[in-house]
Amino acid sequence: MDAGLRIPAERMEVNGLGLVVETEGDGPPILLVHGFPLDRTMWRHQMDALVGWRRIAPDLRGMGLSDAPDLGYSMAAYAEDLLQLLDRLEVDQAVLCGLSMGGYVAFELLRRARSRFRGLILMDTRAEADTPEGRRGREAMATAVRERGASAVAEALLPKLTAPGALEADPELAGRVRRMIEGTPVPGILGALTAMKDRPDSTDLLPSLAGLPTLVLGGDEDAITPPDGMAALAKAIPGARLEVIEGAGHLAPMERPEATTRAVRGFLTGLV
Ligand code: MLT
């Protein structure tokens, strides 16, 4: 779609704060939940290309252009924000798609309101809680962010987010990812680090997702949530389909947009 014809992002008051949300198209709804510390614009290709679906891409609290309060971050808070957002948009049921931290939010949404979702797409994510080492890593990152701001996250994460060499080969992609990270407000980054560090383990939830059509999708060069883990995640969800995106790292929808959108469309077509 011509960028000039885009429906501009809207700001909506939900759960006591302002969330920015972009909606595109008509049809059955799909809710796209971005990762850390990114924003709704990571879904640009899917927002443009998933014609026939009502695409809904919010900025989570503390990220993108949504409000970034100093306190109040948890998976429960992100999930409650999104449930209220669906209410405001008069969406009874949606397909739920989350990338990485967006997947953690998806698990929380399913714990709270499974009946609101008719399909699930988990991208480059994991069901396990943080390990003790992972928690220490979050604390170290929070210290660096307090000292040096969002660029500390960009320095630490950028080399790991994509397939090796992808950012060098594609300066436009590199610029987009860096701008998203560096544009994230510090309270939002600190809040997300706390929310991820404290998130519950979701492995027990997986068998109970039987009956919910599920696609698990990940890049074959993902260093953060590697392909073995994605295969194990798909195996643990009864009936889930696994799609591996070749040549993609942790950001499959941005690194290999056509292949990712094709896989998503194939899955969605089976739902209607
Ligand atoms: C993400 O991409 O959302 C993060 O890498 C998730 C995490 O740090 O666990």
Image: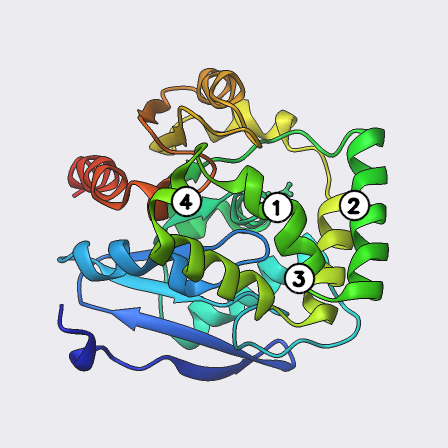
17 to 151, vertically: above or below: below
216 to 236, vertically: above or below: below
**Who is closer to the viewer here, 220 or 102?**
220
> Residue 126: x, y in percent?
57, 31
Q: Foreground mark, 2 or 4?
A: 4
Three-letter amino acid code of the residue under disc 3: Ser
Label 2, on which residue?
Answer: 138
Label 1, on which residue?
Answer: 157
Label 4, on which residue?
Answer: 168
Tell me the CA gap for discs 4 and 3: 18 Å
Q: CB atoms at circles 3 and 1 under 8 Å apart? A: no
**Residue at the location (78% across, 45% down)?**
138
Disc on the earlier residue, 2 or 4: 2
Q: Is mark 1 within 8 Å of ligand 1?
A: yes
Per the image, label 1 sits on a secondary structure element best described as helix
201 to 60, vertically: above or below: above
Label 3, on which residue?
Answer: 151
Three-letter amino acid code of the residue under disc 2: Arg
- Asked whether residue 166 appears in the rendered view, the answer is yes
**Residue at the location (26% across, 54% down)?**
46
Q: Given the current orientation, which residue lies at the most extreme front position?
A: 168
Three-letter amino acid code of the residue under disc 4: Glu
Q: Is mark 2 within 8 Å of ligand 1?
A: yes
- Location of residue 165 (image quadrant): top left
Per the image, label 4 sits on a secondary structure element best described as helix
